[in-house]
Image (cartoon, grey):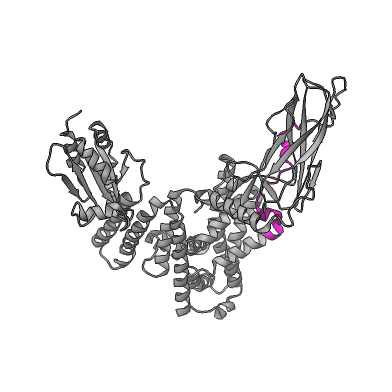
């Protein structure tokens, strides 16, 4: 999803500058001055020494002060579009500038891009060391520092016109060098000037925790949970044997089971941050093609569930024990099970909440995750305390089924977006496999029932697994680097090679051809085949027939009289007729034919 983020981000920033002309953002000074004031950032230049002796070292300091909520990107390695803060000093040849010294950066979770980014914010200083040439003449010199970079929040970025700052520096061999400041040596002190966390951190716990509670409440509105909520509550009331006190305590036990599920998520968050000094950076995963493929396929399967084509069933031993459990232990088990059952419908909410929690300080993130669980548990606590409210709950019906199916279409839309964001060479294989996986999932969930005999059940589900595995192996493996140096189709190049008695191998293929991709993996990804092509000086030609207008498409029918692809043609100098292979399984035959070629 994010593999092209930098290009589009940079393009958007450039367009913003063109359209706005820097209106409202332009610095107040048109000529270099010692201080620049803009709407979002103020910065000034200071000299470590008013007068510097020839041959001595000194430094400049550029002091920045950003408006609340705004930041500079700190590193070119992770700044979108490469729009990180840069300082470029300029001066006469008698001054040699060294690399600027930036303070430690903070880790900011950019929710728009869904990943961590190094930033500078609030008040910070950048130091620029320099040394004066030993043969510098006494003079007053002008030194200037150009400043550039995007100024952003979590929701918007601006590219203000950041004017250069300059100052006068006196060179005098007899002057006493009295320091106005020292370069900060304490990284902790410098880091304290940089804030950590995303946009939500600016609002504080007073808004974050209520939002977490609302997110937990929303889980009970998911189609997977709503139909079973009254049944679960009535079961708890029945177990209470008409004792309101026991009904309340059983409701609390059931809620404890829900909280237990979220405690597992909280522990996972703690382990990642404490033991691995990292977080599950959800946004970073979206830069991985493998993750995009997996997420898109999962969403497609969940959509099939919403359409009623497949069902998710827990093992009977687990569900029966949880459902039949008596007393407080049984209620806890039912609560944990209810939380698990909510995940197919609430996957996006849980993923977003978990990712957000990791962007917060550890204590706040842990509490936030548990508050989400509390939000899911609150309705059960209320309903077991006030059972009369059950009569006022809307009943399931056609509206619930329509809502459930509508959610399925939303999941499909998200899956399509993820697939579109894949590299071009992964899209077609993923789309074809989505069909295969859907068929396998349909077999798994719809071809059997509770009355299906065990042998038939094993055959059907085993077949579904085999279909899914073989399809994944054939279509989802990331493309390997070409072992063969394929040349684009050019009839003149082929004719010249034939005249020179050089063997020619033509591979007719297309981007939309699934069998061609399989043939590529089975035949042309073999190192022994690639080595023979190189050893025998074979000219490898990739004849791309993706569109009708391509030369290879016309040659396929007009010259080689082939009706379709994939087809590979080997032209040998000592044979009047060529050798052709259609389909995908001809690796050994191709290898045998290549071995017959005499070495030059």
Would residue 111 be visible to someone looking at this image?
no
Q: Position of residue 122 (x, y in %)?
A: 74, 47
Q: Position of residue 208 (x, y in %)?
A: 67, 58
Residue 467, by quadrant, is: bottom left
Q: Residue at 85% of width from left, 30% of height from top?
A: 50
Q: Is residue 336 above or below residue 116?
A: below
Q: Residue at 45% of width from left, 51% of height from top?
A: 291
Nearer to us in this view, 52 or 287:
52
Nearer to us in this view, 302 or 35:
35
* 203 within the magenta span: yes
Q: Which residues are magenta?
A: 184-207
Q: How many marks?
A: 0
As drawn, is 596 to the left or to the right of 274?
left
Q: Is residue 582 above or below residue 396?
A: above
Q: Position of residue 464 (x, y in %)?
A: 29, 58
Residue positioned most to the left:
576
Q: Position of residue 214 (x, y in %)?
A: 62, 65
Would residue 10 be visible to someone looking at this image?
yes
Q: Residue at 56% of width from left, 62% of height from top?
A: 253
As drawn, is 343 to the left or to the right of 382?
left
Nearer to us in this view, 352 or 372:
352
Q: Is residue 394 above or below residue 29?
A: below
Quadrant where the C terminus lies? top left
């Amino acid at each position: 999803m994010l593999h092209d983020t930098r290009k589009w981000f940079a393009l958007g920033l450039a367009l913003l500058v063109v359209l706005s002309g820097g209106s409202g953002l332009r610095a107040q000074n048109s000529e270099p001055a010692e201080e620049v004031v803009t709407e979002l950032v103020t910065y000034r230049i200071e000299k470590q020494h008013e007068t510097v002796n020839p041959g001595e070292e000194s430094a400049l300091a550029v002091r920045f002060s950003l408006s609340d909520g705004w930041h500079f990107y700190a590193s070119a390695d992770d700044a979108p579009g490469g729009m990180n803060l840069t300082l470029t000093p300029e001066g006469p040849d008698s001054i040699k500038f060294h690399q600027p010294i930036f303070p430690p950066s903070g880790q900011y979770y950019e929710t728009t891009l869904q990943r961590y980014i190094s930033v500078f914010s609030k008040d910070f200083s950048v130091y620029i060391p320099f040394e004066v040439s030993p043969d510098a003449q006494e003079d007053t010199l002008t030194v200037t520092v150009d400043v550039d970079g995007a100024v952003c929040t979590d929701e918007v970025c601006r590219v203000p016109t950041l004017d250069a700052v300059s100052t006068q520096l006196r060179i005098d061999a007899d002057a006493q060098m009295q320091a106005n400041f020292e370069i900060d040596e304490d990284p902790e002190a410098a880091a304290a000037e940089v804030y950590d966390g995303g946009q939500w951190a600016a609002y504080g716990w007073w808004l974050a925790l209520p939002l977490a509670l609302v997110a937990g409440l929303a889980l009970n509105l998911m189609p997977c949970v709503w139909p079973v909520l009254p049944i679960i509550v009535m079961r708890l009331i029945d177990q209470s044997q008409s004792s309101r006190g026991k009904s309340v305590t059983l409701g609390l036990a059931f809620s404890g089971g829900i909280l237990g599920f979220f405690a597992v998520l909280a522990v996972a968050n703690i382990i990642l941050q404490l033991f691995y000094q990292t977080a599950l950076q959800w946004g970073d995963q979206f830069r991985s093609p493998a993750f995009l493929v997996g997420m898109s396929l999962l969403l497609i399967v969940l959509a099939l569930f919403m359409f009623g084509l497949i069902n998710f069933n827990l093992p009977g031993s687990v569900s029966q024990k949880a459902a039949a459990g008596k007393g407080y232990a049984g209620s806890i088990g039912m609560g944990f099970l209810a939380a698990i059952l909510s995940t197919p419908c609430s996957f996006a909410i849980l993923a977003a909440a978990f990712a957000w929690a990791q962007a917060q300080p550890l204590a706040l993130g842990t509490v936030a995750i548990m508050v989400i669980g509390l939000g899911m548990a609150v309705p059960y606590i209320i309903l077991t305390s006030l059972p009369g409210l059950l009569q006022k709950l809307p009943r399931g019906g056609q509206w619930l089924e329509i809502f459930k199916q509508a959610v399925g279409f939303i999941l499909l839309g998200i899956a399509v977006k993820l697939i579109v964001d894949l590299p071009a060479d992964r899209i077609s294989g993923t789309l074809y496999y989505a069909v295969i996986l859907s068929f396998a999932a349909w077999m798994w969930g719809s071809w059997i029932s509770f009355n299906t005999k065990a042998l038939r059940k094993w055959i059907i589900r085993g077949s579904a697994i085999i279909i899914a595995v073989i399809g994944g192996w054939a279509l989802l493996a990331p493309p390997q680097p070409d072992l063969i140096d394929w040349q684009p189709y050019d009839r003149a190049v082929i004719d010249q090679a034939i005249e020179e008695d050089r063997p020619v191998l033509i591979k007719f293929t297309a981007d939309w051809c699934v069998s061609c991709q399989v043939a590529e993996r089975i035949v042309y990804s073999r190192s022994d085949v690639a080595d023979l092509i190189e050893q025998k000086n074979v000219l490898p030609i990739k004849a791309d027939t993706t569109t009708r207008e391509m030369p290879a498409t016309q040659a396929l029918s007009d010259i080689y009289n082939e009706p379709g692809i994939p087809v590979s043609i080997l032209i040998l100098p000592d044979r009047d007729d060529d050798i052709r292979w259609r389909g995908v399984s001809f690796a050994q035959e191709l290898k045998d034919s290549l071995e017959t070629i005499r070495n030059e």
